[in-house]
Image (cartoon, rainbow, N blue to C red):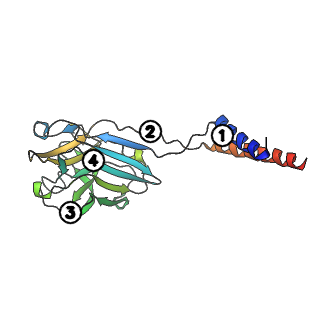
Amino acid sequence: MSIRHTLVSAAAALCCAVGIPSAHAADAVYTFDYAAASAHLGTAPFGTVSLTQDGANVDFSIELTSGYEFVMTGNKKSHSLFAFNASGVSLSDIVGITDGTAATYAAYTSATASPFGKFGFGIDCSSCSKGAPGATPPPLTFTVDNALVSDFASLSKAGSPVAYFSADVIELASGYTGQVGATGDGVVPLTAVPEPAGTSLMLAGLAAVGFVARRRRSA
């Protein structure tokens, strides 16, 4: 067997021996499983909130079930178009809010979304009128810089029920509006990253393989 083949085989065997996992992005998916006006808005699920780790940032994608769109109702900031909690996040970290149309969105702090209570952050459409004329289509997407997916796994306060996320929606067929909330746990796979000890062991092993190869070449 050639020295090159020996090196490749040894390196592969060493990686398997130390059990180094491959790195991949973690994500969480929450389901809008509760409607404040359930008698009018229909049957859950009403949509999903997907969080994807993108390097040091988290990408949000809020989808709604077919036949529903985002809408703003109630007084200013009392029925947030989308509301969420976050740990260690600043308002300036929330960027790139869009639904793919020309609508303009703005984030703010201390949001309220009845009946789910109070959230740390809210998003409204600053260019939309209230009610059906201002309905906007999903998905709503944005990025939170300097964050981890786990930073968003906290419930609202003083609500009944409490929720991880809330959205103000309209059912297009009936024209009814209301808040929907994600009250259940998100599914958060663990991020597999190389262990420091395993990486060191792999490098040491590769160095040893290289040393043996040089000795054999000299002989």
Q: Indicate the position of residue 154 as horizontal and vertical percent values.
A: 34, 42
Q: Residues within 10 Å of mark 4 (few under 14, many from 20)?
A: many
Q: Which residue is mark 2?
A: 189
Q: Indicate the position of residue 132 as horizontal and vertical percent values.
A: 11, 54
Q: Which residue is mark 1?
A: 15
- The three-letter code of the residue at mark 1 reads Cys
> In the rendered view, does 156 fall on the left or right side of 71?
right
| Tag 1 secondary structure | helix
Upstream in sequence: badge 3 or badge 1: 1
Q: Which residue is mark 4?
A: 63
Give the CA distance from mark 4 to mark 2. 20 Å
Q: Which residue is mark 3?
A: 126
**Where, by quadrant of the figure, is residue 146 drawn?**
bottom left
Q: Are marks 4 and 2 in contact (CB under 8 Å)?
A: no
Q: Residues within 10 Å of mark 2 (few under 14, many from 20)?
A: few
| Tag 2 secondary structure | loop
Give the CA distance from mark 1 to mark 4. 40 Å
- The three-letter code of the residue at mark 4 reads Glu
**Where, by quadrant of the figure, is residue 98 drawn?**
bottom left
**Of the residues tagged 4 and 2, which is closer to the observer?**
4
Q: Indicate the position of residue 177 as horizontal and vertical percent values.
A: 12, 47
Give the CA distance from mark 1 to mark 2. 23 Å
Q: Indicate the position of residue 5 as horizontal and vertical percent values.
A: 74, 43
**Of the residues tagged 3 and 2, which is closer to the observer?**
2
Q: What residue is at 86 percent from the left and 47 percent from the top?
A: 215
Q: Are marks 3 and 2 in contact (CB under 8 Å)?
A: no
Q: What residue is at 64 percent from the left and 36 percent from the top?
A: 16
Upstream in sequence: badge 4 or badge 2: 4
**Of the residues tagged 1 and 2, which is closer to the observer?**
1
- The three-letter code of the residue at mark 2 reads Pro
Q: Is residue 96 above or below residue 80?
A: below
Which quadrant of the rendered structure holds the N terminus?
top right
